[in-house]
Amino acid sequence: MFDSEVRTLCVVGAQWGDEGKGKLVDVIAERADWVVRYQGGANAGHTVQIGGRQFVLHQIPSGILHPGVRCAIGNGVVLDPDTLFTEIDELVREGVDVEGRLYVSDRAHLVLPYHKLVDCESAASRAIGTTGRGIGPAYEDKVARRGIRVQDLRHLDRLRDLVTAGIGHANAQLAASGSDKRASAEDTVALLERLAPRLLVLAEDVGLAVHRARLSGAAVLLEGAQGSLLDVDHGTYPFVTSSSTTSGGAATGAGLAPTSIDAVLGVVKAYTTRVGNGPLPTELDEALAAKVRKLGNEFGATTGRPRRCGWFDAVVVRYAARVNGLTGLAVTKLDVLDTLDRIGLCTAYESGGEVYDEFPGDLVLLDSVRPRYEWFEGWQSSTAAARTVDDLPAPARRYLDRIRELADTPIAYVSVGTRRDQIIGVE
Ligand code: IMP
């Protein structure tokens, strides 16, 4: 993926998240010098399988599993310091050397216990089906200029005032939502005082560090979390996360110029899933969804929630290709479809006698659409051992060709299993 032309590559999810970005980033990171997370927080769960061991990373870039790769958490991330250290400690226990190669932007905002409390107690969060990790409330504080940044920990004398302001707002929200729980300023200040020395060791001007690395020719991978249809601007609002998951957000969230991104890889499943509420036009009936969920182990890496399952939606992926400027696609979990007798591919939507081949922003319209499908015969044989496109059964190749055509984007990778080696690099 990296060559003389492509030095900074962004990897985004091109559906509703859980597309298998963790595995792709892990494979590509082998040739990267830096991997940078640019948005989201501990709502993400990037699963990587190495030699029979499974790692689920929530905040630390998956590149950490490659010795020598530097990893950074960018300014666009909302960082939960407590769970960051749990994650670091687990990696160290598993023998991963983290020391000296993990950096945290000093501009990143913190997710604090009161953000999680508000997220878990609010009816609005329940209606969206959030992960309860405090993501929305932390971004809300950031935009309302009430947030606490990593660098604020350098000035512990001012911290109490910042925490008091944040907690005042959080407690008002808790009261308004009818909850009898309240956050404590004392406990929050004590937590931050305890975590500050450990966090400040990691604090860095990440944008500047990565900029300098780029000038010296480094290969930089920008790792997106969630998916394009969960983007706060381009997703199925309000059923979205609170950050910019698309490639535009990568520049802002990593602290790099938009012109520094040379290529954008969109990761898609060979079908579609979504966790939480909101539109999913190609959603399967429960019997088939249960089958695909079991075959694909479609349960949330962060919350364990069962994922809703649907056929591949080319309207969604074509839209994601446009919004992100995708230069390539990685199609994951093709093997999950191996045993199905027929496979649907949505090419357009129909509603009220109209045909829509562009993804609509109007949720009322989206709720009314019926997908228009092309049907493909199932290949009914295992793809798990395929290592080249030619190893794939002909119906699987036809299916991938049609995805490429409809998304108007070349396919760069096809993944056929959870292991690192179960991937086909398409020439
Ligand atoms: P939040 O990001 O926790 O606020 O949740 C907002 C929406 O994004 C909910 O529908 C979540 O299920 C969804 N979401 C957040 N993170 C992920 C993820 O990593 N994968 C898939 N969906 C996610």
Image: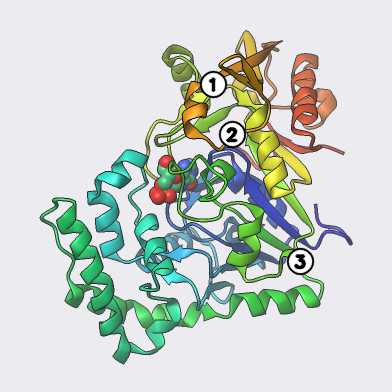
How far apart marks 2 and 3 lie (CA) works out to 30 Å
x then y, percent, for residue 328: 77, 43
Which one is closest to the eye, mark 3 or mark 1? 1
Q: Position of residue 313 (x, y in %)?
A: 62, 27
Q: Is residue 332 visible?
A: no
Q: Which residue is mark 3?
A: 260
The amino acid at mark 1 is Val
Question: CA gap, disc 3 to disc 1?
Answer: 38 Å
Task: Report ligand 1 position as a quadrant.
Answer: top left
List the residue tagged with mark 2: 360
Residue assigned mark 1: 369
Q: Amino acid at mark 2?
A: Pro
Image position of 267 with respect to 158: above or below: above
Q: Are marks 2 and 3 in contact (CB under 8 Å)?
A: no
Does 43 sit left or right of 246 as displayed? left
| Among the two numbered marks 2 and 1 on one chain, the one whose residue lies closer to the N terminus | 2
Of the residues under marks 3 and 1, which one precedes in the sequence?
3
Compare residues 83 and 404 and report the one nearer the observer. 404
